[in-house]
């Protein structure tokens, strides 16, 4: 579904992705973790070309991103992206946030788009907020609307960049629950997160990154019980100690 | 003994100061000043929007001429643009009414400044908005139309009002090509009566001040009302 082969990315002289080789299967949930600044965001942002890669090959849903014939807007419509900062449109109501893309891109009739949006809002538990504006919602609610907005294009892949990092602790659960439900429907997901409970429970595979390199790739059990790389061991110790897991 | 100032020249000519010979003749005075300012403001809003979009275009073939035009006009005195139009327009288009000439000059001039406001407004919208929108598959034009401009224009309203206030003052330069706006009316009455220049020019200073102050106050009030969209 997503294949990185020898992918590099530089920001000027900064080598942010260093020889990434990664394969995500259809229906798979991949969790990416690693210290801050290690290139996790850059990695998933390359998948829908929010960041272009510098070299190597990246194939998403069978399409080579470097190929001139790949319609990048069409590809992006097939890939949902959920941001740390939600990025809802503050001037549009919740329902319009969700229906905008289906109406403008897929030419879905308004009534039909709204009906689908209501189904999605029900799924994320926010049906009664259809006419609210984003700034009237809590962070957790905004993020759930953002997930519904991404799902409205019926994507085949969903990318999450630290979706709960900007949330108050009591709101993290509601967002993770929505993501877990989504994983159970068989959605292909790449999730950058430090929520190790989520990784253990939902992920099929965990990739550990540091300084632009994927140092370790393993099943959650292996990764949490027997991390191989010293950097991964250190990372897990730091993450787990304060939380007494 | 004569009083120091005699404002009877104002009260005697008050209607003429306000609307010129209107409705029996052409509009003049404060009425024409506002008319010139409003029409030029509306036109230069669209001019500024167009220039802004061209100057941030991906295509250098439209971007460079737009940027060159903006910088050229911003480096010129308005009076020169008015003269320019005054002599150029008849040469290009034949006989053109003076009001039209002045509106064209003000529009050309103000569009360049408006474009800077629009560009700043567009750049003021957080990058995350564009990223979220393109991630759903919207094209860059759709993002501009449905996401960036609706938010950006709202933030620009106070700057637009300030630009309008500048326009009210700028219209006074139209007197030089014989357009009978407030300043021109004042010089006319001054030339006719000869005796009251201080009174006349104190009066029009107060009128300009009241007009500008009213709109500046409006702009402050709008700024207070519109802060919501900056919360995100
Ligand atoms: N647009 C950019 N321009 C220059 N440097 C960037 C840009 N985005 C990220 N970086 C740098 O790339 C590195 C990796 O960033 P990022 O992918 O955001 O890491 P992570 O998500 O793991 O914290 C960091 O050093 C960051 O400062
Ligand atoms: Mg990040």
Image: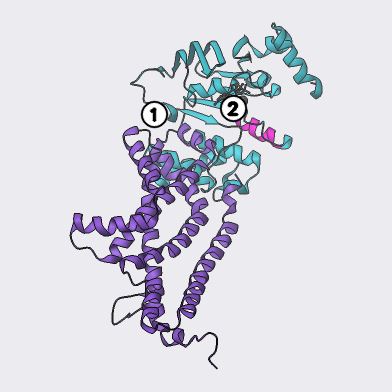
Chain colours: A cyan, B purple
Instruction: Give me the residue at 47% from left, 32% from top.
Output: B135
For the residues beneath circles 2 and 1, the answer to whether they share a chain is yes
Quadrant location, the C terminus of chain B:
top right
> Residue A16: x, y in percent?
57, 17
Majority secondary structure of magenta residues:
helix
Magenta stretch in the rendered image: A171-180
Tell which of A110 and B62 is nearer to you: B62
Residue B206 in view (yes/no):
yes
As drawn, which residue projects farthest toward the left? B94
Q: Does residue B45 show up?
A: no
What secondary structure is marked by label 2? strand
Q: Secondary structure at mark 1?
A: helix
Q: Position of residue A163 (x, y in %)?
A: 62, 30
Identify the image quadrant of the N terminus of chain B.
Answer: bottom right
Residue in front for this viewpoint, B52 or A119: B52
Mark 2 highlights which residue?
Answer: A161
- Residue in the picture at 20% in, 54% down: B92
| Residue A236 appears left or right of A181 | right
Which of the chains bears the disc numbered 1? A
* Label 1 sits on residue: A74
Confirm or reject: label 2 Cβ below 8 Å from ligand 2.
Answer: yes
Between the C-alphas of marks 2 and 1, the distance is 21 Å
Side (left or right) of A170 relative to A66? right
The crowd level at tag 2 (other Cα within 10 Å; few <14, some 14-19, many 20+) is many
Residue B182 higher or lower than A171, as above or below: below
In which quadrant of this rendering is ligand 1 seen?
top right
């Amino acid at each position: 579904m997503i294949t990185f082969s020898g992918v590099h990315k530089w920001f000027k002289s900064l080598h942010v992705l260093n020889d990434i080789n990664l394969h995500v299967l259809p229906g798979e949930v991949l969790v990416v973790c690693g210290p801050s600044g290690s290139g996790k965001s850059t990695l998933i942002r390359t998948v829908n070309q929010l960041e272009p890669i510098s070299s190597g090959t990246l194939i998403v849903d069978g399409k080579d991103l470097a190929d001139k014939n790949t319609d990048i807007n069409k590809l992006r419509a097939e890939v949902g992206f959920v941001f740390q900062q939600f990025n809802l449109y503050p001037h549009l109501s919740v329902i319009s946030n969700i229906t905008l893309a289906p109406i403008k891109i897929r030419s879905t009739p308004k009534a039909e788009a709204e009906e689908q949006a209501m189904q999605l809002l029900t799924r994320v538990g926010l049906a009664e907020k259809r006419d609210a504006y984003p700034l009237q919602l809590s962070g957790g609610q905004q993020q759930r609307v953002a997930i519904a907005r991404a799902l409205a294009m019926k994507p085949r892949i969903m990318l999450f960049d630290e979706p709960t990092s900007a949330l108050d602790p009591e709101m993290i659960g509601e967002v993770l629950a929505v993501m877990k439900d989504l994983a159970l429907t068989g959605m292909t997901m790449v999730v950058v997160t430090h929520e190790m409970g989520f990784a253990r429970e939902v992920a099929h595979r965990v990739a550990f990154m540091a300084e632009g390199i994927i140092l370790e790739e393993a099943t959650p059990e292996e990764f949490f019980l027997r991390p191989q790389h010293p950097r991964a061991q250190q990372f897990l110790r730091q993450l787990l100690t304060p939380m007494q897991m | 003994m004569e009083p120091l100032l005699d404002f009877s020249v104002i009260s005697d000519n008050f209607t003429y100061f306000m609307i010129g010979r209107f409705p029996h003749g052409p509009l003049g005075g404060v009425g024409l000043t506002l008319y010139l300012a409003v029409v030029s403001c509306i036109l230069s809003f669209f001019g500024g929007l167009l220039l802004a979009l061209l100057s941030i275009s991906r295509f250098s073939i439209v971007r460079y001429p737009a940027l060159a035009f903006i910088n050229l006009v911003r480096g010129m005195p308005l009076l020169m643009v008015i003269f320019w139009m005054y002599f150029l327009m008849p040469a290009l288009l034949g006989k053109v009414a003076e009001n039209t000439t002045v509106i064209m000059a003000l529009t050309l001039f103000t569009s360049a400044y408006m474009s800077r406001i629009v560009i700043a407004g567009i750049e003021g919208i957080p990058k995350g908005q564009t990223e979220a929108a393109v991630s759903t598959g919207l094209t860059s034009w759709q993002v501009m139309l449905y996401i960036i401009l609706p938010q950006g224009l709202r933030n620009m309203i106070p700057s637009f009002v300030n630009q309008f206030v500048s326009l009210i003052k700028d219209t006074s330069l139209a007197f030089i090509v014989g357009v009978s706006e407030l300043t021109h009316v004042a010089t006319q009455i001054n030339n006719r009566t000869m005796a009251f220049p201080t009174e006349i020019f104190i009066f029009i200073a107060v009128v300009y001040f009241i007009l500008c102050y009213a709109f500046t106050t409006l702009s402050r009030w709008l700024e207070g009302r519109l802060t919501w969209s900056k919360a995100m």
